[in-house]
Image (cartoon, rainbow, N blue to C red):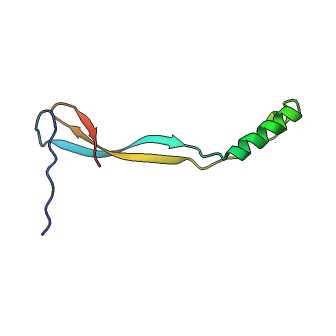
Amino acid sequence: MNTIAKITCPTCESENVTISMHQTRSTIPVPIYKKLARGILVSSTFGLWWLMVPKTREKTRFKNEKIAICQRCGMAWLLA
């Protein structure tokens, strides 16, 4: 017994709604001890550390959210 829920627009009551995934945020987690250690090395070498050693590459985390867009009035809202 598969039933598909109908999504209606809260403003115009239209059922012509498309659902899509959008990237809303991206963060690069860098631990505080790495920032602190890099700052100490830069200040103690009078900025030479900043020129010589490249920053470490951290993995980027993305946050995606499901958004519904009404094709009739153009209203967009987040789906839970």
Q: Quadrant of residue 15?
A: top left
Residue 67 locus on image (x, y percent): 30, 43
**Above or below 15: residue 50:** above
One can see residue 54 in this view: no
Where is residue 71 shown, x and y percent of the image?
Answer: 18, 36
Q: Is residue 13 above or below residue 61?
A: above
Quadrant in which residue 9 is drawn:
top left
Front-most of residues 77 and 16: 77
- Identify the residue shown where x is 80% and y is 41%: 53
Residue 52, given in percent of the width and then of the height, sits at 83, 38
Q: Residue at x 78, y 36 (%)?
A: 39
Q: Looking at the image, which residue is at 78% across and 43% down?
A: 37
Residue pushed farthest right?
45
**Nearer to the camera, 46 or 23:** 46
Residue 40 locus on image (x, y percent): 82, 38
**Does residue 17 appear to the left or right of 64 in the view shown?**
left
